[in-house]
Amino acid sequence: MSIETNDRSDEKVWTRRCIMSVAAGWAVILPLAIVSCPVPVATATTPNPVNASASAPAAPPELPDLPLEVAVVPLKDANGASFNLGDFFGKVMVINLWATWCGPCRREIPELVQLNKEFRSRGVEMIGLSTEDPDAATEKVRKFIQDFQIDYRIGWAPVQVAAPLMQGHQAIPQTLVISRDARILKHFRGFSPANTSTQLKQALEEALN
């Protein structure tokens, strides 16, 4: 099991809640950069710093199983219907944590829509969980679904679901590939226009096979 991650951000996203810093001397945005947006502290926890020797860098942490206590948390989709992640045990799941205000998320979602069209008939369940406040953002999310022609399930990520899934990394988008037996096979943090879609497709093929 492995983690696809890069916490560096090389893209400006001019929104009130997502402002990415760029070094003053840079004239262009690197095309291979993985970009992400910070999310409110309430939806994630920050791990204690880990001391690592320069000559012996720490190995990536082992990815856990999807905790049962997370899988049974009652969730609501954008239309108010109830579900939980445990409903899809036995299927390969893709869980995408996102928000309408996040620039990298907006760039990634068309890729997820295309992957859903390709893999849905093969038993993959795509689930988008917004980190926004449902009381304030319901209409915005519904409009977003229409504008981006999202044809997979969109719901809300309460803190008791978002925090364990994000594993202490306060940035979105984050995408997890979950096996049929509820193991987290891949965890992508941020979005790379050049790589994320290809790597996610490969991860899905591996999960299905």
Image: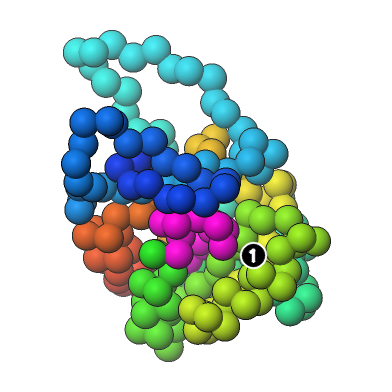
Q: Does 118 sit above or below residue 130?
A: below
Where 6 sits versus 72, above or below? above
State yes or no: residue 103 in magenta.
yes
Name the one closer to the observer, 187 or 39.
39
Residue 79 coordinates in the image, percent (x, y): 74, 79
Q: Is residue 150 above or below residue 186?
A: below
Counting from the top left corner in percent of width and height, residue 45 is at 61, 33
Alpha-carbon neighbours of circle 1 within 10 Å: few (<14), some, or many (≥20)? some
Residue 206 appears in view: no
**Position of 106 compared to 140: left or right?**
left
Q: Residue at x 71, y 47 (%)?
A: 160
Q: Name the quadrant containing residue 164.
A: top right
Element at label 1: helix
Residue 2's x, y, as percent?
33, 46
Rendered residue at 36%/54% (across/down): 191
In the orientation shown, which residue stands out farthest toward the bottom?
A: 121
Q: Position of residue 72 (x, y in %)?
A: 73, 59
Amino acid type of the residue tagged 1 in the rendering: Leu
**For mark 1, what is the residue?**
85
Please report the residue visible at 25 percent of the width from the left and 65 percent of the height from the top.
Answer: 198
Q: Residue at x 57, y 74 (%)?
A: 144
Is 7 left or right of 148, judged from the image as shown? left
Residue 148 shows in this picture = yes
From which residue to which does the magenta span run?
Answer: 94-106
